[in-house]
Amino acid sequence: MKSPGLCLALLATTLTLAAQAATPELKLWYEKPALSWEKEALPIGNGRLGGMIFGGLRREQIQFNESSLWIGDETDTGAYQPFGDLFIQLEDDELGKLKPDSTTGYRRELDLSRAVHSVSYTRNGVKFQREYFASHPANVMVFRLTADRPGTYSGSVRLTDMHQGRITADGNLLTVTGSLAGYKYEAKSTNYAFALGYEGQVLVLHQGGSLKAAEGRIDFTKVDGLTILVCAGTDYVADRTRGWRGEAPHARIVAQLRAAARTPYPALLAAHVADYQRLFNRVSLTLGPGPDAAALALPTDQRLLQYATNRQDLALEALVFQYGRYLLISSSRGAVPANLQGLWNNSLRPPWRSDYHTDVNVQMNYWMADPANLSECFLPLATWLNSIRQVRQAATRAAFHTRGWTMRAENGLFGGSTWQWVESGSAWCMQNVWDHYAFTGDRAYLRTLAYPMMKEVCEFWLDRLKPLPDGTLVAPNGYSPEHGPREDGVSHDQQLVWDLFNNTVAAADALGVDREFRALLATQRDRLLAPKIGKWGQLQEWMVDRDDPKDTHRHLSHLVALHPGRQITPLTTPALAEAARVSLNARGDVSTGWSTAWKINLWARLLDGDRAYKLIGNLLRLVGDTRMNYSAGGGLYANLFDTHPPFQIDGNFGYTAGVCEMLVQSHAGEIHLLPALPRAWSSGRVQGLRARGGFELDLEWQDGKVTRYHLTSPKPQAVKIRVNGEVKTIKSTRTR
């Protein structure tokens, strides 16, 4: 009878080989170590712990983060903080001194199908292999170094801390403890009211050879291999009534590390892969006949470089789509949502605080969660919004003398908010909150989490709106981020308030509650200043017709009614949709990374697949390619991180959302298959995309026409579907 450990080892091996054989196109790989954190290092994460891996030969560097490591308080945004770095120094071994030409076959790789990072190479006839992953089930990061000859590893493991914490080495354990007291984002910040405590531990397990603790490090000599376990945490708790502080993380970290250390490595790997694939494998996408072997043979940076002049690599477009899903799974599985950089940050003063920007960015982070079948990954955003409600109510009451709550542009973990007021920012967040219900039909979520927040934000606007002489309601002193003057009736505000009231009416109907409040919202919604068409045929950005046709500003704030809203569609409001097209044309096709991603979604909503595909070409370009002249920025780094510049993850997430919108739309009372299919994607197949109403679908097409589709839902139900130009009503089958 096989032992449990052997069975798990065989299972892990089988999973590994099967994934590698089936999905070679879902790998990022490179022929040399990373030098740049932002442009070349590769990310891993389990939703709470994240690492950026460099893959160095003589010295491995893993910069790591913990999602709740924030400075700030209830008045100031503060900033997301880096935790530290783990360094593995590899010394020359008895096989001889390392020579420049003695290392061959170097490959650094991130396998999206398994969420495993690996480094492999041959040196002096010995094959070396490293595997890294961030396990959600075990709540640790795992780093494994092996070789095909015993006794080949000598060196040290060292830990650094970005906040001057105390680092100790004892036996095979490195520990860092510290506090964020005294750290500020900028000099003018006052001392923050909440100074989280933190701890990190690194447990080094060795096979063969010897190991001993030294001054702040752990030395290993002639070992066969290493398994390094990393765990970290803070005393943050998402509960204002407890002062945002919970138990010290020490006991939790010790328990998690001990449990992981007792688990054989193959079992840790198998559990990680199974847990990750439960989410990731829900969706598969093939564009065209399949991946090009010649393209797959190129390192990812060279592949991206080639794509700029020869857009035949459809598998790269699918890879970047799945990369967005990988990044969301890796950065949004806990109480803390993905920020401007997801989970990854290496700076004490990161760009824009690595915060929750509410004038498009945090909303864009989550556009793809439900359509791309990652509904669980949305919940951290709703959880965080719910946790800061009381903070925002107090700040809103002081600033506007209203009920309800809203936010400024910059927002931190504890509800602190800085820079400009974006009065419609909370309404925009409520659009995400409602959409999660629209996709899932989760009534418990709607009743206990979504509807109470939506109702409070409605109360802010019921108190805030003011009537014009003819009785039309407008948002006073509005703001069209990040552009133009403040004044009454700004289109961005009007559209988001309409969306908020409309969705909250639907929510009240679904729950059968608040009939009088629901009736008031419907009445006030219908009194709102509606979208207007201006003198050059554009959708006006302001109540006053002042739009400049030469303005190419990156923000598209007056188009939220088209996407991600549903007030404007080509099928129901064709004149307004055409005006939106005029405005979008005027803004141009060249912009920052996140803006380009939004334009992909907007052109998809206008049912123009070829124009959306043109924007995909603008986004999927290697930053620094001197053959391309993009003065406005945007594009991808070699590690496929999107850049504003600098790195902002919303462009990655927005791209994935855009591909979903090109293939399936469900916002206009029907499910529309291939609404914005470009000619370049004349054939393909997708499995597992979600549609509003709780539907999941598989879809195949050839010569631009749907050839097969299958629609499922938890309960069989009738649904209107538009396929190949025909609208019909079908009945879904029960989800297996």
Image (spheres, rainbow, N blue to C red):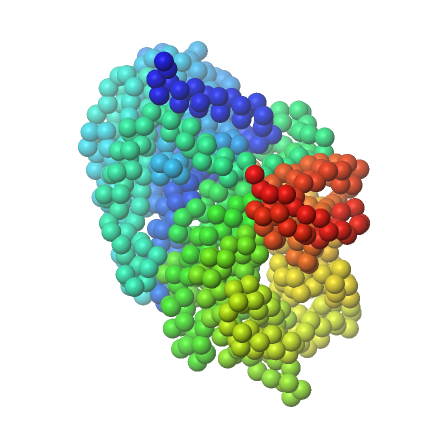
Q: Is residue 85 left or right of residue 729?
A: left
x, y (%) of residue 62?
A: 39, 36
x, y (%) of residue 575?
A: 78, 66
Q: Residue at x 41, y 71 (%)?
A: 393
Question: What is the quadrant of residue 573 in the picture?
Answer: bottom right
Q: Residue at x 67, y 25 (%)?
A: 294
Q: Quadrant of the N terminus?
A: top left
- Looking at this view, is 323 or 347 the one in front? 323
Q: Residue at x 50, y 57 (%)?
A: 443
**Extreme residue toward the bottom, this view:** 469
- Looking at this view, is 428 or 516 the one in front? 516
x, y (%) of residue 245?
A: 28, 57
Indicate whether 69 appears above or below 698.
Answer: below
Q: Residue at x 60, y 84 (%)?
A: 467
- Looking at this view, is 478 or 624 the one in front? 478
Question: What is the quadrant of residue 227 in the picture?
Answer: top left
